[in-house]
Amino acid sequence: MNITRNTPSPLFRLLCLAMLTSAPVQADIAMRAAQAMARAGWTTADKLAKSRWSQRVAVLNGAGYARVDEKTATQLQDFNDTLLHDYRGDLGRLRAAADGDTDRALKKLRVFKGIGKVGAAIFLREAQAAWPEFYPFADKATLKAASALELGDDAGTLAQHVSQADFTRLVAALVRTQLNNDFDDVRAAARETGSR
């Protein structure tokens, strides 16, 4: 999924991933569920609209997303209906409607069923690679990790450490560090690199 292409399919898949990862499941299970949806061919709003509830449940369950599979299968339909109705299946229209205002974009994302504050922040954190008007954006998980690693506690400070092109990679690395709680390994690697 190449977000930088800024086309409807990768952005749609990112929205699905944001919904799946913001639910009370492990991040690796949410990732497997998003990959399973792509394998099922549900890579756009139009394609997901052709799926049946029972198919969505089976795909989510098969990916290990079993505890909340039925609820999520319904949420997928609901948020997909909103995407088709409000934006004709193209999140680029949401981008245009937000007009570069981060708070407006987050608010518009939270309209989708199953996308709360965390899901909206996950989406925008990744989408800024294709939507540079929202740069620099960092969500709570990113900033918590950045603060623990003494890289700053706001997006502007964090952005000073890397180029704009590398910012989303840094943010993703910080989120992985937070999820895996491997701060000691990161600090050790930084010391080793610094001593060369």
Image: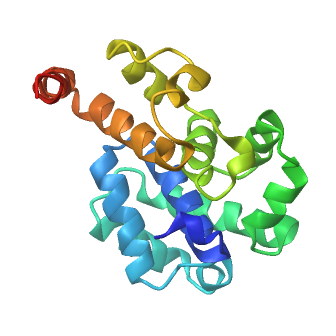
In the figure, is residue 147 to the left or right of 19? left
Q: Is residue 22 visible?
A: no
Measuring from the top left, give residue 158's x and y in whole percent: 50, 25
Q: Is residue 176 visible?
A: yes
Measuring from the top left, give residue 129's x and y in whole percent: 58, 54
Classify 91 as above or below 168.
below
- Image quarter hosting the C terminus: top left
Q: How is the image coloured?
A: rainbow
Classify 148 as above or below 83.
above
Measuring from the top left, give residue 144's x and y in whole percent: 42, 19
In the figure, is residue 93 to the left or right of 148? right
Classify 160 as above or below 1.
above
Residue in the picture at 88% in, 48% down = 99
Observer-nearest of 186 and 76: 186
Observer-nearest of 147 and 190: 190
Callout count = 0
Observer-nearest of 174 and 42: 174
Q: Please identify the quarter of the rendering in which residue 191 is found.
A: top left
Classify 82 as above or below 143.
below
Measuring from the top left, give residue 174's x and y in whole percent: 36, 33
Residue in the picture at 37% in, 54% down = 30
Q: Please identify the quarter of the rendering in which residue 141 is found.
A: top left
Observer-nearest of 188 and 15: 188
In the figure, is residue 154 to the left or right of 41? right
